[in-house]
Amino acid sequence: MNTFPDRIKLDLDKPYYIGSVQKLYDVPAHPDLLVSETTSGGSVFDVGTIFNIAGSDVGRAGFRHLVFQELQNPEAWTALSGRMSGESYIMRKDASGLIEKILADFCEKGAPTHHIGMVDRESGEVFSKGFPQKLSNLTLIKKYTVMKPALKNVCGWHFYDYEHYHHTDGNVIPLEYIVRLGITSGSSILRKFNAMGDADRNAYLAELGIDQPLSPWIRFDAPLVDLTTKYEPEDRNISRQEAALISGVDGETFSRSLVMAVLGAFLLQQIFNRMGLSLWDLKWEIARDGHDLVFVDTIDTDSVRVTFDLIREGKSCFVHFNKQAMRDFYKIIHPDWLGAVNEAKKIASNSGRPFTDVLSEGQKKSRYPRNPVVDEAFLDIQKQKFSMIQSFIRNQGQELGEEAGRIAGLEIAYYESANKLEEYLKLNSAG
């Protein structure tokens, strides 16, 4: 059984890794561990850090710590099992019994994760359960190897070589597992479906395993697992077959990873239900550790789509309490910039170059608009969302529906004052 320190020495001078929303640091005397420092920066459309929301660093780290504690908690899985037993469509659909088997294992021991605890910034004390008196943006995690596929070029063609994943262990599987409980207007699979002809649509629906056309704001009887590459310059949607091949694991292990992702989504749905919010989709990353599969990376409001649902003029209106709110802001308020981002991605996909290089080059030559500055009034609304999340972390028994509704009303009023309400409702309403 792994034993981890209950107090560590913090050395935050030289990051081991700098990402768009977090930094990773080595832990003195513990080469198998890392400290994650969540930042207040935000990234959308794979562009990199282009905005900051005050308080989001602590809010995201706190929510991450809450979620991983639930994943590790057998009692949380037992409560979920009680709700799913005999009633869940996906349980009845699973003839193999794999879901029931893995769920029973989680009910006994909890789910394995790389998360060890939240670290108090002043003392270095590690809280594997509960929270420090002052919420921190530091978490302690077990280190797993991250490998990138090699880019190969031949005769002007290019492809990514995943061969070395089949001969390693203790690494993060090079996939993002996107679990969809429903479809929002921003879902990538909806865009893909809408761009297809009728014959291709029918084949795509069969591949997804659903028997109804895709449209915004529908819920599924059973979750879908959508898969993308993780370590290519741009995330790329791939089939289950391709995902199984590049994962580097055998078929049985890949099957278990799919079930883990689905069960993790159901557990997270429980948490958001307590906040008065609806979960639509989320993404997981999973590592292999010998024969075990482990939930890794981060799970926070950057990696989920959750909404507060209200009625406006007889229609259901969905206000995002996650990064989709920022995506919609750029889409509605700065469509020219988003058009340039999409054009740069198309050019990059044909050349093998990182699309951020294409975008930056175009901006320097004034062919593309510069990255927009986000309106402070809109950022303040997002800050209030994170304040609500921190409040929930501190007191999980409180009722947040009224507060979430108030904040949702502010966001709708923002678009109304900008004369963009029609565009907003086109994306985020139904009925």
Image: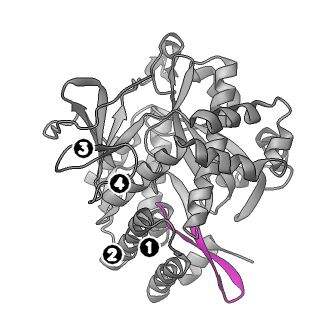
Q: Give the residue pinned by disc 2.
A: 375
Q: Give the residue pinned by disc 3.
A: 125
Q: Nearer the viewer, mark 3 or mark 1?
A: 3
Query: How far apart are the alpha carbons under marks 3 and 4?
Result: 10 Å
Answer left or right for 240 relative to 18: right
Query: How far apart are the alpha carbons under marks 2 and 3?
Result: 38 Å
Mark 1–mark 2 contact, CB under 8 Å? yes
State the extent of the magenta-drawn residues as a range: 307-322
Instruction: Name the mark on residue 333.
Output: 1
Q: Nearer the viewer, residue 45 or 145?
A: 145
Q: Residue at x 62, y 57 (%)?
A: 270
Query: How far apart are the alpha carbons under marks 1 and 2?
Result: 10 Å
Q: Position of residue 225 (x, y in %)?
A: 67, 42
Q: Position of residue 73 (x, y in %)?
A: 54, 43
Answer left or right for 128 relative to 247: left
Q: Position of residue 63 (x, y in %)?
A: 43, 55
Could you tell which of marks 3 and 4 lies nearer the N-terminus?
Answer: 3
Classify mark 4: helix, strand or loop: loop
Query: How far apart are the alpha carbons under marks 3 and 1?
Result: 44 Å
Instruction: Name the mark on residue 131.
Output: 4
Would residue 319 be counted in the magenta stretch? Answer: yes
